Structures are given as structure tokens and as C-alpha cells.
Image (cartoon, helix red, strand yellow):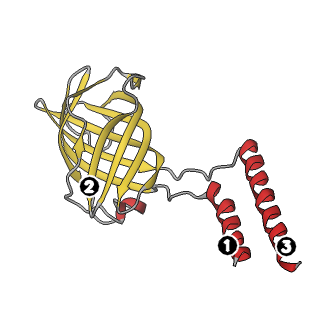
Amino acid sequence: MFKRLSLFALAAVLAAPFAKADPIVGTISAAGVDTFTSSTIQFFSGSISGGPGANTGTFALYLTDGNPITFISGVLPYNQGLNMVPPAISPVQLFTTTEAGETFTFMMESYNALYSDTSSGCTVGQCLAVTGNGFFTGSGVVNYDNSPGNFTFTSQLVNGQTTTTFSASAISAASPVPEPSSLLLLGSGVLGLAGMVRRRMSKTAA
């Protein structure tokens, strides 16, 4: 009996350092309403949209068109070019959405902002095109790994009001490679456990 339990314990020691939840992968699409000035953006509402095929991967398991999105409250300041979220508040929660028991959140670390009149959907006036980087979190039915991701949106100025088109994607995180010190610790534990099993078996045989 002791031998069997020891082998189970050995398997647990081997598995523990490599246990890892699933990363978030895929894309989501949304639309909403916001306003922007020459230095700030403010979101008012948003929802999942895009029709069949717009939401893929992990997101497609839970999110459907029409599900609301909650964006950052207050204004988001920006300058044209690269913007870094201040270290004191980085990463900042850009948006979150919950459906079917799962909550996805995008945590933003940096973003680029540029004016454009050639962006997709920019047919009247001037658009603000923003791209940024950070990571997605997922919790609820499944607690996913934090997964690197990016977002893009264009905001079209029409009579002082803007309509946002928004898309985001999550990039599959690479499998972790154990550090040499972790491997050394793992090896020491395995050898020690194996020695205990061998001594116990020798006593039983005697």
C-alpha cells in the first residue's frame, strides 16, 4: 500500500511544476459610442457585434452579439504616437464583458493614437485610430491564464459625436520553460522520494 501511495506522490511532484491552465486565444469584435477631443477619449457604451465568425476561439465559447461591454470610466488621455499607461496604475482595465458565467477583461499597458482619414469605416470627417497592447484575463466557469493580447479601434467624428468600431485579439502564450534552479529542486525531491520508497521496500522484503 505504501509503495502505491509513494508512486502517486512521485507523479504529483513531477506534474506540479508543469500544471498550467489554458491561455485565452481568438478574437472579439464590438461596436459602441464614444467622444474624443484632441487629447482625451471617453467611452459611453458598447456591445459584442460583428455577426457569425467575428468572435473566435475562447471568446466564441461564451460571447454572443448584443452582449454589453463595460469600458473604462472617465476619460482616457492620449497624445499622438506612443502612450504608456503610468506605472502607478499600469495595467489599466480598458474593458470587461461577462456572459454565460465567464468574465473577460482586457488590461492595457500601452497604446498608439493617430488621426486618420483612410481607416476602414472612416467616411465622414476625421477618425482617431488607436492600437494598443496588454493582456486578457478570464475568470468564472474557467479561470484562464493571463494571455498577451492587443486591441484596435477607430472612432469616427460625425457632428461632434463618434461611433466606435472595436476589435481585439488574444495571442496564445508560450509554454513555460522551467528554470535550472526549479529543475534542480525538482530533481532533489524526486531522488529523496525514490530513496524513501526503496528503503521501505527493503524493510518489507526483510
Badge 2: how crowded within 10 Å, few (<14), some, or many (20+)? some
Amino acid type shown at disc 1? Leu
Judged by depth in the image, the label closer to the viewer, 1 or 3, is 3
- Asked whether 124 or 190 is in front, the reply is 190
The disc at residue 139 is none
> What residue is disc 2 on?
98
Other-residue count near label 3 (Cα within 10 Å), few / some / many at <14 / 14–19 / ≥20: few
**Quick check: 124 left or right of 53?**
left
In the displayed structure, 138 sits above or below 165; it is below
Identify the mark nearer the N-term, 2 or 1. 1
**Residue at left offset 89%, top offset 78%:** 206
Q: CA distance from mark 2 to mark 1?
A: 42 Å
Q: What is the x, y in percent for residue 191?
A: 81, 58
Where disc 2 sits, the SS reads strand
- Label tally: 3
Is 197 positioned to the left or the right of 67 in the image? right
Q: Secondary structure at mark 3?
A: helix
Q: CA distance from mark 2 to mark 3?
A: 58 Å
Residue labelled with disc 1: 5
Residue at left 29%, top 38%?
154
Q: Could you say where residue 145 lies in the image, as x and y percent from the top left?
A: 48, 52
- Left or right: where 128 falls relative to 110: left
Identify the mark at residue 203; answer none if there is no mark.
3
Distance CA(mark 1)–CA(mark 3)? 17 Å
Q: Nearer the viewer, residue 58 or 17?
A: 17
Amino acid beneath label 3:
Lys
Q: Earlier in the sequence, mark 1 or mark 3?
A: 1
Q: Percent from the top left, x then y, of residue 198?
A: 84, 68
Q: Amino acid at mark 2?
A: Thr
